[in-house]
Amino acid sequence: MSQPELPFSAVDLALPEPSPLSFRYEQYQADTEFDWHRHPWGQLNRISLGLLELQLAERSLVAPAEYLVWIPAGVEHAAHIRQSLDYVSVYVAHDAAASLPAQPCLIAQTPLVRALLDDFCQRGLGAITDSWDARQAQLLLHRLQQAGSVDDYLPDSDDRLLRPILLAMRTQPGDATTLAAWAQRVHSTERTLARRFQQHLGMSFVQWRSRLRLLQALSWLKLGRTVSDIAAELGYATPSAFIAMFVKQTGITPDRYRRQLLAEGAAA
């Protein structure tokens, strides 16, 4: 016997229906938990920094701040926020949501997507009420379609060759073992493993490892560890090499990210 659907929250029902978008703004404390819930409209989740972790019925989603997390209307989920941050929920009308993915996913904030959202958020817009904002909302929706989506920032795989590699790397993100060396360990070839990374994870071995290291670095920065210590523990030859990876992945330096963490904590 199936369980009844969760009711929509009173907070959601008190908001104006999106036309085509509406916005809700919050400031959350570190280690905020949200129990299982669902929304009457599609929802784009946006955070100012750090990580957003969502639990779905069959899997989890972890996203750093450069991604939006898309949850279609009615999909039950729970959430965890590790650090104090600013949060924006962008609700999407049903007809507009039809052009976005049918399943929960991550959507990259391209420079234009970020700029359009920044403008709405800086003005504290709640509902679309004039023709200029309506045009901007339509442009944003169009650019969200073009931005593409991924199922997870750091996907996993049950592939018999990849699974032991991914497990070992998750256990020790600083492991510098090359793909060629991994191929020898799992009795395969570097070319075969490279192909399986692309087929099963949608990215290269180096890209997956960089994302894993970024998630670990974000956690350690929150704990106050120094950039040089983190770089060494994650297997980078120099702090500058680690900083280059961090900037490529997030658009900001580790020190700036740390300052944002401190500022968010002071404002909370």
Image: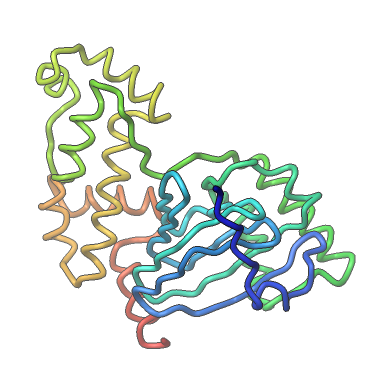
What's the residue at 15%, 37% (across, down)?
168
Whole-percent x and y of residue 171?
Answer: 15, 45
What's the residue at 60%, 57% (across, down)?
4
Q: Is residue 157 left or right of residue 153?
A: left
Position of the C terminus, as image quadrant, is: bottom left
Q: Is residue 13 left or right of residue 243?
A: right
Colour theme? rainbow
What's the residue at 41%, 58% (across, down)?
53
Q: Is residue 55 left or right of residue 24?
A: left
Tell me where residue 198 sits by quadrant. Answer: top left
Q: Of all residues shown, which one is farthest toward the right?
A: 131
In the displayed structure, 56 sits above or below 206; it is below
Whole-percent x and y of residue 84?
Answer: 39, 76
Tell me where residue 46 sits by quadrant. Answer: bottom right
Taking depth in this image into account, of 245 and 202 the one nearest to the observer is 202
Whole-percent x and y of residue 164?
Answer: 18, 30
Taking depth in this image into account, of 189 and 133 the one nearest to the observer is 189
In the displayed structure, 123 sits above or below 66; it is below
What's the residue at 63%, 60% (across, down)?
115
In the displayed structure, 67 sits above or below 261; it is above
Q: Is residue 106 left or right of residue 117?
A: left
Whole-percent x and y of residue 242?
Answer: 23, 51
Taking depth in this image into account, of 262 and 80 the one nearest to the observer is 80
